[in-house]
Image: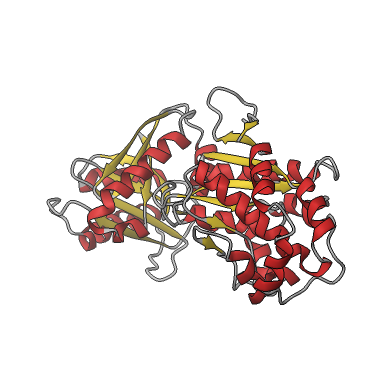
Amino acid sequence: MSSVIVHYGELALKGRNRPWFVSMLVRTIRLLLADQDVKDVRFVLGRLEIQLGPAADWTEIKTRLLRLPGIGNFSRATHVALDLDAIGDAIVKAVAGRPRKTFRIAARRADKRFPHPSPDIERVIGRRVQEATGWPVDLEHPELKIFVETLSAEAFYYFDKERGAGGLPVGTSGKVMCLLSGGIDSPVAAWRLIRRGCRAQFVHFHSYPILSSTSQDKVREIAGILTQHQLRSRLYLVPFGPLQQQVVVSVPPPIRVVVYRRLMVRIAERLAERSRAQALVTGDVLGQVASQTIDNLEVVGSVATMPLLRPLIGCDKDEITTEAQRLGTYETSIIPDEDCCTLFTPRFPTTRATHANVETAEAELDVAGLVQAAVDAAVVEHFRYPMVQSSVPSARPTRA
């Protein structure tokens, strides 16, 4: 029988809480592979085993597992009887006919009741493979590494390890609300929180119909990509153009962007409270644009009453771009669009807003009314991955 052996890295350090983290990872893997021929997902002596049926699509399973937070590494493995001769016979048969390679055996004895310690397993199996193939052993830099794991009632062998996403299983660190602009930075910021075990919800501010709907289409696609990592998502689409029109009438041009962002934080926080999210997340990078100086970030963040997380704050554009390319959001993020940040933007925005100036300007606005109107007008769309009952991506719009 074929299985996938999953090793978790960071979860091993969780002490008494480890069983809960592992159970969350098992649950997520079951949801992830619900439409595949998977017989069972179970915990076995410090690792997980995904038992595959004959119709399982290994290429698709591998692609999905590579994206899932909480996995250190995984391998497609073959069951074999818990007997040293049987293990050796199976491995010799499996490598027969392969091109000449240097190799080594890497054994792990999970159950110490098995009479042969790991060095003995490596020595005996290595000798069997060398006698059968003539391959030379290279303990430092082998071309082929053959892994053997002995458990309580059976053993596994496999040849390749796939490196997982690492981090913590989705849902183990609570919910966050991510402000998703459609640019390069904010999807990466959201991914970093997802990888740390957060369930991310998304909010996007748009200026349709004043501007085109391109930014909404981009954000839907990005939300779909991020959903492949956390399986369930909500996207709140907030019409922001009416608020901007009122800001333009009352607020001096240099501080308009700061006022826009303070309104966004207030609205996002209200939506976060509705969805029981515990923090806000932005893609802010220190010094990248005028609104992201320390002074402006402090003035903007001061209106939040829940934690405001900025996971990219010390990154540079090159490393964010590289991560976006690896994540798969980059090509969508660079599609030209007209988002709300381009509407009514002053030519010379301030880089040193003060609380006094901003609060004086906001006194000319009905801030509470503007926030409430935007929250009431928000539309929420639901995303799910994989789609077990339909091949069409799920996006059901409803009022927030």
Pick whichever, 198 or 324, lies toward us.
198
Question: Residue at point 74% right, 59% down?
Answer: 364
Q: In this view, which residue lies farthest toward the top? A: 389
User: Can the viewer see residue 124?
Assistant: no
Pick whichever, 289 or 364, lies toward us.
364
Q: Is residue 160 above or below residue 63?
A: below
Judged left or right of residue 61, residue 267 is right
Residue 135: image x %, image y %? Answer: 41, 60
Residue 45: image x %, image y %? Answer: 23, 48
Q: Is residue 100 above or below residue 274?
A: below
Residue 398: image x %, image y %? Answer: 63, 30
Total marks shown come to: 0
User: Can the viewer see residue 136?
Assistant: yes
Residue 35: image x %, image y %? Answer: 49, 28
Q: Is residue 202 above or below residue 101?
A: above
Pick whichever, 127 or 318, lies toward us.
318
